[in-house]
Amino acid sequence: MNAQVFVIKHWFSLTAKVETINKASEPFCSGVLRALWDFTGDMLHLRLALTGQILAIQLIDYILRGVAQVMFVNNSLSGLLIVGGLFLQNPWWALNGLLGTAISTVSAIALRDAVSAGLHGYNGSLVGILMAVFSAKGDWYLWLFIPNVLLSMLCPIVSSALSAITSKWDVPIFTLPFNILICLHISATGAAHPFFPQPLSPTNPSSEPVFLSVPVGVGQVFGCDNPWTGGVILLALLLCSPTICFHAMLGSIAGLALAAPPADVYSGLWGYNSVLSCIAIGGVFYIPAKLTPTLLIPAFFCAYVSSATSKLMSLSLPACTWPFCLSTLIFLLLSSENPALCRLPLAAVSYPEENRLHWTQMVSTVNRSQPNRSPLGCGGTGDHGCAADKSAATA
């Protein structure tokens, strides 16, 4: 029997079907592409290969996935690229981010929570990086490790508490633990604290060309204003999912379109929340459909919320990712009978291409099991849920 090679043609100019090829006649280029394919998506084969290995080896994979999960990416190689981009921006920031991710992950392990997908590391990563960004003591102030470790340890605890609430509506907690903990830290210390003072003006407006503001807006998710760092992050997203990469750029552009002050346009501070919102709505939690222009609505709305939040908190606190959390949760909780809007159950969420394949297979299965009914699509979100999921559960 001929060996089978799976060549997947993504939705969005990628792969979507499985073809059988005779391995003996397989050209060299196909073999190379097949090898590269193993590093895309969620790299499930690596996670399975590490099962049963010593904890120290598995922990490296957990940490890298935790860093990547900030951008909704469950890929350790993408996480490694993002870490490289962070070191390109500032090694001290990158070190604090890795420390925060590691401490948060180890704390989750101690609480016996699942950590293999990195879902307990990304809040710790943001806490560590932004704590270094909002420090008036500058780089290599080692005493900063103390609050970094303490707050990162609290990340899985706060996450667990918030999950008990959000699970009632089957929505994620996003970066709410990071927002809560970093705002508590900044409020408790302030500009006059003798050991951990906060800068009065943490951002330095730049005057880069406008086209560089797109990668800068992506990099600002991690507090980085280096366009090269943003470019590396986009490359990491492209490796895992071109759909996520596209929506990251779309969100950054949408956010920048509403940024009236030139300094805000150049710095990307209006773009990063829209980046996260556009990724979340554009294929991670919703099925990728023909409503790509509609994605601009949550992106623009998120930009408006960013402006309002920045003004409300400008006296003492940064906006962080509060606008992203608030605006995206609103769109995840909406109820609609539009057949093109379908939100996946939280337990079934993966990267967009896999989500699309999962939904297509589910709809096909339900339609085959109930041939007398009209073809099943997706008919609602929020409390209505996905029609295909409900029918599959009752079939």
Image (cartoon, rainbow, N blue to C red):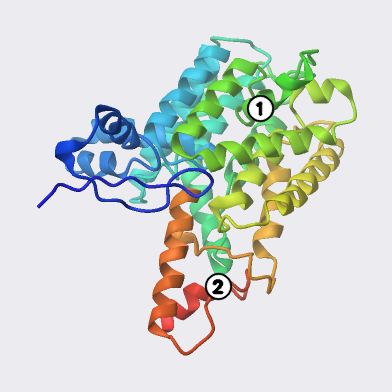
**Residue found at x 53% / y 9%:** 140
Residue 259 x/y as whole percent: 85, 32
Q: Quadrant of residue 348?
A: bottom left
Q: Residue furthest left?
A: 1
The tag on residue 220 is 1
**Residue found at x 15% / y 47%:** 3
Of the pair 388 and 72, the residue shown nearer to us = 388
**Residue found at x 74% / y 18%:** 199
| In the image: residue 35, left or right of residue 337 | left
Residue 392 appears anywhere in the view: yes
Of the pair 326 and 150, the residue shown nearer to us = 326
**Residue found at x 14% / y 38%:** 24
Q: Name the residue that disc number 2 marks.
A: 377
Specify the amino acid type for callout 1: Gln
Residue 330 x/y as whole percent: 71, 59
Residue 228 x/y as whole percent: 59, 16
Q: Residue furthest right?
A: 260
The tag on residue 322 is none
| In the image: residue 346, left or right of residue 261 | left
Q: Quadrant of residue 117?
A: top left
